[in-house]
Amino acid sequence: MLIDAHVHLDKYGDLLDEALKEIEQEQIFTVATAMDIPSYLELQKIGERSELVLPTFGIHPRRAAEYADRLQEIGRCIESSPAIGEIGLDFHWVKDTNTYPAQRKVLEYFIAAAREQNKFVNLHTKAGEKEILDLLEKYDVRRAIIHWYSGPMDILRAMIDFGCYFTIGVEVHYSDHIKAIAKAVPDQLLLTETDNPGALRWLKKNDEVGMPTAIKDVVNKVTELRQSTPERIESLVHANFSRMIKDDPWLYEIRNRLLPSNS
Ligand SMILES: [Zn+2]
């Protein structure tokens, strides 16, 4: 089974039906990450339409400033969500430094909750890589998916030592740095993502909508870089995701239902 560990399903608009159809046809287990509260509410509805979709609640660093004084509200949403994401820090694309304290406050609230409630996290780390690793260490949150890692190699290695998982995504087709990362992540920590539907459009500066089968292109490229086979990469990623949620108190049923072949 293919695993797409970071997708924004609520952003498909008119193409949502088609996207869900592809997910079912190709049997792509999809972690549907939220950007904010309205996005999460939308994802919960979408999640009811497919057993392959796991909606998760998070506040994207771009939206953190609007939520820094709404932690109680955030807390209620976290409790209703089986996992956490998208959360993180962005000190690169977000230029307004006034938002940075809010980003830090909101992120730490989520990480503390992840620790308390034993939920895995899906992290955006752009230019905040070291700080995020420090937080994961501080709260001993071991089940962390680092989404679209593009930071320095020494922090990558430190995150690997800590046991973080890494999603390789669509930029693997275009960037030498991402290719190097796709080769450096050890077998047991490798995951895949598309960051659909916007990632391809953002990278290629066109109006392409990323559809779920883009995950196959990622698998093929990773296969080439790691000199493997698509079948082996697919089953490796499947085994890694299954292992990550093996003892997850919130996902036990999903694990048994969807990922029975690996332990
Ligand atoms: Zn994302």
Image (cartoon, rainbow, N blue to C red):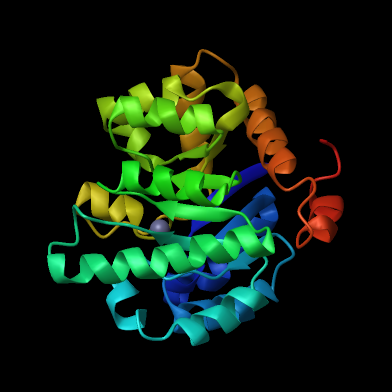
- Left-right relation of 195 to 3: left
Give x and y (percent) for residue 69.
Answer: 36, 85
Residue at the image position 61 percent from the left and 54 percent from the top = 120
* The N terminus - image quarter: top right
Residue at the image position 43 percent from the left and 20 percent from the top = 183
Furthest-front residue in this view: 138
Residue at the image position 28 percent from the left and 55 percent from the top = 201
Residue 220 visible here:
no
Give x and y (percent) for residue 138.
Answer: 49, 48
* The C terminus - image quarter: top right
Residue at the image position 62 percent from the left and 78 percent from the top = 44
Judging depth in this view, the residue of 38 and 207 nearest the camera is: 38
Residue 211 visible here:
yes
In the image, residue 46 sits, relative to residue 96, either above or below, namely below
- Left-right relation of 238 to 213: right
In the image, residue 205 sits, relative to residue 163, either above or below, namely below
Q: How many marks?
A: 0
Image quadrant of ligand 1? bottom left
Give x and y (percent) for residue 181.
Answer: 38, 26
Judging depth in this view, the residue of 216 and 90 nearest the camera is: 90
Give x and y (percent) for residue 25.
Answer: 68, 54
